[in-house]
Structures are given as C-alpha cells and as structure tokens.
Amino acid sequence: LPNKARLRHLAEATHKINEREDEGAGEAETRLEGAERLIYALRQGRNVGGLVPVSTVVQNVYANLNEMAGGGKKIPGIPTGLVDLDKNILGLNNGELIIIAARPGMGKTSIALNIALHGGKNTDKSVAMFSLEMSREQLVSRLLACEGLVESQKLLTGELSTEEWKRIATAAQIISRTDIRIDDNSTLTVADMNAQCRRLSNLGLVVIDYL
C-alpha cells in the first residue's frame, strides 16, 4: 500500500482500538488480542475491515491464476511431500485447518514433523511448531533422524556408525538452513500462539502437536 494509505489505515485501526478501550468491554487479554489482530492486518497489507470493490478482488484472483498457469507453482499451497495427498488437497493453503487424526502410537507426530520439514525445506516460508508434549530437543532429534535416514533410537543412545554420523551432520546443516521455529511450552494458550505467529512476517505453516 502507498505510504499515505497505510497511515490512513493505521489511524483507522488506532481509532477502533481507542473505541474499544472507551467502551471497556472484555478482559485485558481479549482487548490486546483484538488490537494485535488489527495491527497484523495492516502488516499484511489488508484493510482494517470495510467493503472492497469486487474489481479489486478480481485482479488479485487473476494475478494468482496467472502465476499458476505460468508454471511458477504446481500447487497453490505448501507441499506436504506426499505427492498423492498434494494432488487431492492442493497442498496446505492459507486459512485451512487440517487435522491429522489417528489412534495413539500410530505416527501422528512423525507425519506432522515430516510435513513441517518438507515445507521448511521447499519454500522460503517460516514454519511455527508448537509442542505441548515433547521438548524442542526431542523434536529436533526426530527431525535429524528423518532427514538423515537414521533410526530415532540411535540418536538417544549415540551409537552411530561413521556413515550415520556423516548423514546426521549433513541433516543438521540442511535443517539449520530452514526457518522452522519451535516452542515447547506446555502451558501455551491459543492467544499465546496467535501472538507469536503474528510476529512472524513470512509465516507459511503452523503445526500444533497436539490439539
């Protein structure tokens, strides 16, 4: 947006925040959440509410269609790495809530980690991972095992062959080049997650283990 338009939208957002403050409705956390949403919308180049001419929306849709047709992207969303799945759901797209459901011990965390790693490696987007059960170190150990094609158990004991050490070292370099962020605070609330995600300017995917 042009600078003057951004300033105008910022003034509108400030006015809305002040209005809610004057009304005194809701708890402090709720008001803070609302204020963050307004500022986040501005950072994303979106209006703070209001009616938008359909002609403007048509231009946006046409631009996206043109990019797809030009061969720039095979699917509109972030690829999961599972080719058949991507063909059916067209990747992981903005605004979608996708739940991986299965019985305990069936590998829900493993598939979520694989998808997060694939997204981090194959896009320039940030991937936020919130783990309410496992520590950062446990998650990264599993990422290393996955990328290095080494049994997870061996990373717990350190009993690795020379070749496996090499693969883990290479995996560590590859994973370190991604923009995957991990929070293992088990007391996180939805508002906490929202606040952290809004601070990432290039967020592409959020993984929560578990819901």
Image (tube, rainbow, N blue to C red):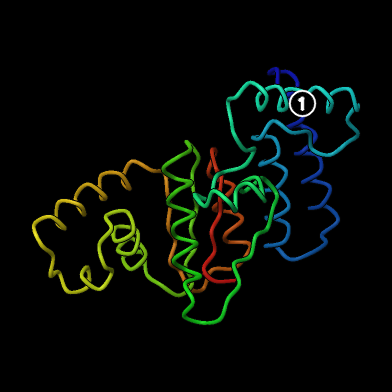
Say which quadrant the C terminus sits in: bottom right
Q: Residues within 10 Å of mark 1 (few under 14, many from 20)?
A: few
Which residue is at 70% across, 17% downward?
2
Q: Looking at this view, name the residue that lies furthest to the left.
A: 162
Give how far across and how far down residue 21 sits, in percent.
Answer: 78, 53
Task: Check disc 1 and report its element: helix, strand or loop.
Answer: helix
Image height check: is 44 above or below 21?
above
Q: Is residue 52 left or right of residue 199?
A: right
Camera-side residue: 11 or 69?
A: 69
Give how far across and how far down residue 83 sits, in percent.
Answer: 54, 48
Say which quadrant the N terminus sits in: top right
Q: Looking at this view, name the residue that lies furthest to the front.
A: 84
Which residue is at 13% across, 65% downward?
160
Q: Looking at this view, name the residue that lies furthest to the bottom.
A: 104
Camera-side residue: 79 or 141?
A: 79
Residue that badge 1 annotates: 60
Camera-side residue: 81 or 173?
A: 81
Image height check: is 197 above or below 152?
above
Q: Is residue 119 left or right of residue 41?
A: left
Which residue is at 12% across, 55% downward?
163
Give how far across and how far down residue 29 sits, in percent.
Answer: 67, 62
Give how far across and how far down residue 207 sits, in percent.
Answer: 53, 59
Q: Is residue 180 left or right of residue 169?
A: right
Residue type, numbered disc 1? Asn
Which residue is at 79% across, 64% downward?
26
